[in-house]
Image: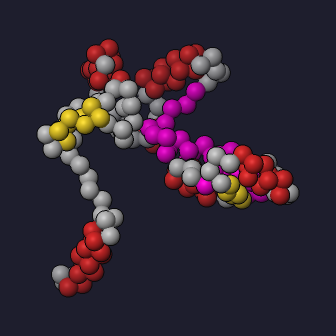
Amino acid sequence: MSNDALAWIDEELTALEKAGLRANIRTIESPMDAWVTIEGRQLLNFCANNYLGLANHPRLRQAAAAAIDRYGVGPGAVRTIAGTMTLHLELERRLADFKAAEACITFQSGFAANLATIPALMGSGDVIFSDELNHASIIDACRLSRASVVRYAHSDMEDLRRKIAETKEYRR
């Protein structure tokens, strides 16, 4: 394919840049913590999942190093392909005990948890009432479930009550 055939990509990127919509991925020069270094500046990190900086706590780092020494740096594939490691089963058992629950399952991300759980619980003939500002993973999971989705105004319990009252036929 010639460079001319790909010129549209440059045009799209230029348009995104002019509109202020082109993604700018920052380089983090420090450990992912509550404070990070970007372009030599110390900045408070409001965007990572390590909200409290616990990922760098000495006890957690020691436990992670011990687990790496014993198990390596990863399971190699998802459970459904490679199987479940004893380490994951132990984590789930401890989490279930901590929460006084019968059982627990862990996922590699909240996105994966939503995509696995919502379609497993809901399906065709069901209705899901979904906040209009829900995370993309919840929206995608609702679509995957094939349930009817009724959106209500963000955090508006009156709108939710109204939508529930208006929705008549559904399985669950």
Q: Is residue 17 inside the magenta stretch? A: no
Residue span colored magenta: 104-132
| Left or right of residue 49: residue 163 | right
| Left or right of residue 101: residue 14 | left
Across and down, in percent, residue 84 comes to: 47, 31
Q: Is residue 72 above or below residue 80?
A: above
Across and down, in percent, residue 120 comes to: 65, 46
Residue 71 seen in this snapshot:
no
Given residues 24 and 72, the one toward you in this image is 24
Residue found 68% across the figure and 44% down from its top: 121
* Residue furthest left as drawn: 40
Across and down, in percent, residue 93 comes to: 54, 19
Residue found 84% across the figure and 53% down from its top: 165
| Number of marks | 0
| Left or right of residue 12: residue 134 | right
Q: Which quadrant, please, contains the N terminus? A: bottom left
Residue found 28% across the figure and 16% down from its top: 58
Residue 82 sits in quarter: top left
Q: Is residue 126 inside the magenta stretch? A: yes
Residue found 15% across the figure and 44% down from its top: 39
Residue 96 seen in this snapshot:
yes
